[in-house]
Image: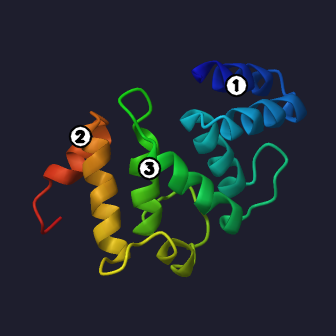
Amino acid sequence: MRGFCRLGRDYESFADTKRARSIFERGAKAGDVSCLYRLGMAHLMGQLSFPVSHQNAIPLLHRAAQSSSLTVPQPAYVYALLMLDDFAHVNASIKRELFEEYVPAGSTVEAEAQKNLERAAYLHFAPAQYVVTLPAHF
């Protein structure tokens, strides 16, 4: 399924955002993790002619994080950073309520962020491995 994302990226590189969006949306419908992640990031950062919309971005990024794999580990890492309000590429803080919908009863946003960091580290995403192994005082 990664073909969807590659094709979408090819259209992006030729500045054909209309076709790129269409391909990413088709891939996301088919459950392609890379497409879910790309669409989520596009909504988050106002790319692909989307306005900035945290409300549209978070569900897509959550789905991508839950589907992270050895071939696509970064969604879990980025989602965790967003939950912790530690993602430098976003200009404004994301309302905590947007994440709380995805937090199981008895857990917290911070605990779920930690789980996502650990998941990304387990999937061999090097930046997550570095963060997970840092001493607590960092």
Which label lies toward us, 1 or 3? Answer: 3
Which is more N-terminal, label 2 or label 1? 1
Amino acid type, label 2? Tyr
72 sits to left or right of 31: left
**Gap between marks 1 and 2, in whole Å?**
27 Å
Residue at image position (20%, 52%) is: 132
Mark 3, Cα crowd under 10 Å, few <14 / some 14-19 / many 20+, is some
Amino acid type, label 3? Gln
Dot label at residue 9: 1
Which is more N-terminal, label 2 or label 3? 3
Contact, CB < 8 Å: mark 1 with mark 2?
no
Tell me residue 19's x, y (percent). 86, 29
Amino acid type, label 1? Arg
The residue singled out by tag 2 in the image is 122
Tell me residue 74's x, y (percent). 43, 40
Height in image: 100 above or below 73? below
Please identify the quarter of the rendering in which residue 109 is found. bottom left
Number of disc labels:
3
Q: Is mark 1 on a helix, strand or loop?
A: helix
93 sits to left or right of 131: right
Q: Quadrant of the N terminus?
A: top right
Q: What element carries label 3?
A: helix
Tell me residue 59's x, y (percent). 60, 60
**Gap between marks 3 and 2, in whole Å?**
13 Å
The residue singled out by tag 3 in the image is 66
Which is more N-terminal, label 3 or label 1? 1
Residue at image position (81%, 59%) is: 51
Which label lies toward us, 3 or 2? Answer: 3
Which label lies toward us, 1 or 2? Answer: 2
Q: Quadrant of the C terminus?
A: bottom left
Q: What element carries label 2?
A: helix
Please identify the quarter of the rendering in which residue 54 is found. bottom right
